[in-house]
């Protein structure tokens, strides 16, 4: 099989980048950046903390995306020149080394451009929003609690790698780890990027809680919902909720503070329970818990509308929330997604937050599913 001509490959990547830019519209992004910079320069902006943080986060994101696009375009041009220099080189050793360097650059650019292309697939109603993630330990006892903690760390490490802001609202600890946890990933398109992670995750490994060293299978459930915005009109009547306060605590019962500042809210019509204990103030914890409750109610409403539409179409294939991924640490190492078929033997790296390839495969898979349902 003949090798791909470098010039043709670079032209292909350049065309793909043109297609991406046609969707993301860099000129519109530059216009928005100018407007956001003007807002950020307003000394009164920080009188509204939430709005100020939203403005600065959006500004940083757009500036980063524009820099990324410009850098890719420049690197494609530089790589084309590098191949030309290699062809002109008379020293065979130098020629091969230069061509190899250029080929490595093309491979890196292809991966980055394909990753950027994934973003153009995020066109759902709520895809551009921050994500709210809840993880619950399921079957498996102590190992399930430990696994739930592993998953929380995996997502927080993933966010850290991408320099995304996160906020942990609540962690309920069990004897061996995390019974449940709720946290936000605050980045543009966080929900669209992570919504495919929703479902049951399964871990197989030698249990460190079994004195006979036997293999144990455990499960944890991941729930991903978009963060609510003011335009969503999610109404929560005071007579529909029960508010309980309690003392925040950490692993092993260690006191986080000495006042009853943690808040648990039960939505009586649906039975949804949320809690928050990350703030020192009971008022702040209640506000955060109400935001989490609103997000879960919004997602429930969205799911009900989707189910109603699916029933009208006679289509019941929207069961994305079943078992989605296996993490095997014994007798071999492998992580495999049940829906996309994507797998890797680098299980420890995945649990350390290297999940981008799984996420990209999920987004493509979900987009295909959505097209089939239309």
Image: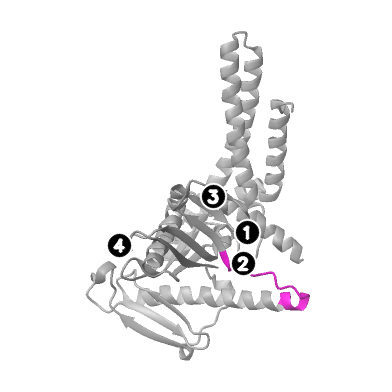
Check the image and report above or below for 282 versus 198. Answer: below
Residue 81 placement: quadrant:
top right
Label annotation for residue 104? none
Residue 314 included in the magenta stretch of the image: yes
Instruction: Tell me what residue is drawn at x 52 percent, y 53 percent.
Output: 335
244 lies left or right of 273: left
Sequence order check, earlier mark of 3 and 1 = 1
At x 62% / y 74%, what residue is drawn? 302
Which residue does the numbered mark 1 point to in the structure image? 339
Residue picked out by circle 3: 356
Q: Nearer the viewer, mark 4 or mark 3?
A: 4
Q: Mark 2 points at which residue?
A: 320
Q: In this view, does 37 lie above or below 271?
A: above
- x, y percent for residue 71: 57, 36
Q: Which residue in the protein does label 4 denote?
A: 211
Residues 363 and 262: in front is 363
Rounded to the nearest angstrom, the CA distance separating label 3 from label 1 is 16 Å
Residue interval drawn in magenta: 309-323
> How far is mark 4 from mark 2, CA to CA?
36 Å
Query: For this view, does 265 lie left or right of residue 229?
Result: left
């Amino acid at each position: 099989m003949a090798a791909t001509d470098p010039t043709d490959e670079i032209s292909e990547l350049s065309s793909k980048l043109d297609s991406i830019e046609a969707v993301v519209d860099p000129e519109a992004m530059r216009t928005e950046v100018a407007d956001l910079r003007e807002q950020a320069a307003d000394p009164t902006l920080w009188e509204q903390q939430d709005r100020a943080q939203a403005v600065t986060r959006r500004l940083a994101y757009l500036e980063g995306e524009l820099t990324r696009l410009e850098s890719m375009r420049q690197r494609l041009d530089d790589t084309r020149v590098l191949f030309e220099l290699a062809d002109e080189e008379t020293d065979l050793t130098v020629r091969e080394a230069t061509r190899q360097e250029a080929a490595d650059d093309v491979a890196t650019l292809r991966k980055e451009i394909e990753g950027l292309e994934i973003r153009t697939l995020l066109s759902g109603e709520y895809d551009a929003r921050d994500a709210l993630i809840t993880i619950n330990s399921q079957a498996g006892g102590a190992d399930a609690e430990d696994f739930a903690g592993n998953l929380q760390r995996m997502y927080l490490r993933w966010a850290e790698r991408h320099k995304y802001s996160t906020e942990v609202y609540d962690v309920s600890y069990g004897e061996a780890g995390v019974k449940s946890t709720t946290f936000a990933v605050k980045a543009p398109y966080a929900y669209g990027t992570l919504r495919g992670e929703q479902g049951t995750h399964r871990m197989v490994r030698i249990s460190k809680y079994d004195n006979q060293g036997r293999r144990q299978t455990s499960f944890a459930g991941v729930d991903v919902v978009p963060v609510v915005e003011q335009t969503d009109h999610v109404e929560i009547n005071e007579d529909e909720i029960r508010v309980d306060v309690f003392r925040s605590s950490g692993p092993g019962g260690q006191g986080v503070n000495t006042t009853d500042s943690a808040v648990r809210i039960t939505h009586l019509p649906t039975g949804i329970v949320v809690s928050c204990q990350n703030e020192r103030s009971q008022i702040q914890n209640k506000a955060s818990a109400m935001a989490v409750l609103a997000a879960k109610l919004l997602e429930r409403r969205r799911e009900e509308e989707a189910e109603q539409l699916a029933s009208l179409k006679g289509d019941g294939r929207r069961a994305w929330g079943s078992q989605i991924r296996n993490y095997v640490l014994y007798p071999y190492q492998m992580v495999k997604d049940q829906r996309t078929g994507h797998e890797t033997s680098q299980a420890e790296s995945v649990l350390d937050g290297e999940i981008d390839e799984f996420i990209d495969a999920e987004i493509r898979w979900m987009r295909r599913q959505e097209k089939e349902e239309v």
